[in-house]
Structure formats: C-alpha cells, structure tokens
Image (spheres, grey):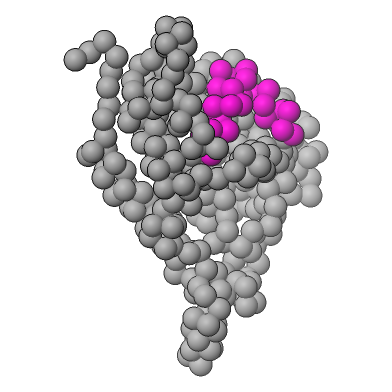
Amino acid sequence: MIAAATVVGSAPQPAVAKTIDIALIVNNVPITNDDIAKRRNLMRLMGTSGNLNEKAREAMIDQALKQSEIALRGMSVTQPEVDQSFASFANSNGMSVAQMSSILNQAGVGVDHFKFYIAVSMSWGQLLRARYGSETLLPEDEFIAQLEQAEKDGKKPETTEYLLKRIVFVVPEKERGSLLAKRKREAEASRSKFPGCDQAVTFAATMNDVTVLDLGRYLEPQLPAQWKDVVVKAKGDTTSVITTPFGAEYVAICQRETADDDYAARLVLSAKEDSAEKDMDTESKTYMKELKDKAQIVTPGKS
C-alpha cells in the first residue's frame, strides 16, 4: 500500500503539479498544504495542543520519511489490514465505520488521510520490530523457566484485571472550541455523584449529551494506552477526566480483581510488555534521526 503510494507520489505529472499546492518535497515524496491542513485537523480532533500548524508540518515530514523507508524495505502492511484496523478503531470508540467516517469528514480530516496515517503507523511498527527484534511476550521456554523460579521463590506474578465503562460528555466538533472546557468541568463535577456501573446508563440520562460506552475487560498490561495511566492511578471508582476526539470523558471502574493465572503471569514476567513500548519509542527516535540526517527536504520556490 505504502510502496504504491510512494511510487505514485514521487513523480507527479506536470498537469497535476500545476493544480496541487506543494508545500514540501521530502525524499521525492510531495507534501501539499492540504496534507498539512488535514493533519492539523486530525491533531485538533485528537486533543493535541500547541502550535498545530508547526506540529502538523513536522508530522507530515516524519510521515514522508517513514513512507520512503517503508517502501525501500518492503515492509508495508496491506489495505485489508488497514481497513480492519480502521474498523477496530471505530468499534473501540463505540461507533460504526460509517459514523467514524462521518466524523473524520466533518472535521476536515477525511477517511483516506486517516487510513494512510494508520498504514504508516502500522508499517513503521512492523519495520521497527524487524530491525530491532522486539517481541511483546516472553518465548514459551523462557516464560516457563521464569515462572518456575518465581514460584520457588514464593512470588508468583500477579496483576490487576479491570472491567471498565466510558462516561462521555459529548462535544460536537463544530463547538469544540467554545464548549470543551465547560464540558470538562461538568464531567469532573459528576464524578463525585457517580452511582456505580449498574446505574451508569440511568445516571447519564439525567444529563445532557452524556453517553455510556463499554470499554471492556482488561488485564493491567493490556490497558489501552489512552486510558492506562488514569486507570492505574485512580483511587476510587472513576478516573480523572481527559479530553478525546469525542469530548470530555472519564472511565468508570466497575471491577478490580487480582489475576494470577498463567496468562497474567506471562504478561507480568514479560519485561518487554512494559519496557518494549519505551524501547520502541527510543528506537524509533534513533531511526528517525538517521533518516533526517540524510534526508532531502525541498521547499518549492526556495533555493
């Protein structure tokens, strides 16, 4: 998928070039002002703060560098994999593919832009794993050896299993700038009145534009990155409030239970489960520095 896009994008036809406002060319991959605008809109939808124009420009440069390297190494994921990831993302946010597509289009991002963002992210992770050999779980033989040793020491690994619901104070995209702060205050104020998961839907019905979504059951190492920190740090039955593309929301913790079966133990013993994400981030930054150091970045019209 990415290889094809790189080949197509690297040599635009003259007639097309006249009609496309190219902002940058990174290793023969053109980046248009429209690309940057869509990435800025995506960042806004994701709750990114700061100078979004500059951040979007840098993000598109990084994406172009990754795109070229992925194509060179032949490490692109397939279109069906991207479509499945897109559908899973929509489902995890309590929406259909059509609803997610509508939100992206209304926000000025577009489905194609978001899917290509997914494609590059997935392919880049695949490339990093191939280059650095990172794995998520311990191999079976290592796990068994470590588990036997832990049991001999009387320290069988355990973790926490959570059952979670999302309480979403919805903010329409067109009202995000004027309404988000108010909705965040409302969400925060509601936490002290939360009656528990069994009454969550009834509770939400007493307020305007509040919805309840099942987040599901997770072992602590498997918690979605967006929620992991606030869930683990939560003292009561609700987390602190965060902003998401859908508004202001918090997670209700319906159950907390200790899990010490073999699967939970394997997650805990797999040091890479927690460290791999940090290691992968470091490896990604190192790799990106290598690519930037030798990149050819051209601004049309400037010498």
The secondary structure that most of the magenta stretch takes on is helix
Please name the residue shown 44% across and 69% down the image.
271
For this rendering, which residue is in front, 47 or 103? 103
Q: Quadrant of residue 295?
A: top left
Please name the residue shown 26% across and 10% down the image.
301
Give percent across and percent down for residue 255: 69, 59
Residue 78 falls within the magenta-colored stretch: no
Q: Is residue 59 in sight in this rendering?
A: no
Residue at the extreme left: 303
For this rendering, which residue is in front, 179 or 121? 121
Please name the residue shown 65% across and 67% down the image.
257
Q: Quadrant of residue 102?
A: top right
Quarter of the image that includes the N terminus: top right
Q: Which residues are magenta?
A: 96-119
268 sits left or right of 261 in the view: left
Give percent across and percent down for residue 222: 57, 59
For this rendering, which residue is in front, 218 or 134? 134
Q: How many marks?
A: 0
Answer above or below: position of 114 versus 83. above
For this rendering, which residue is in front, 212 or 108? 108
Please name the residue shown 48% across and 52% down the image.
126
Q: Is residue 78 in sight in this rendering?
A: yes
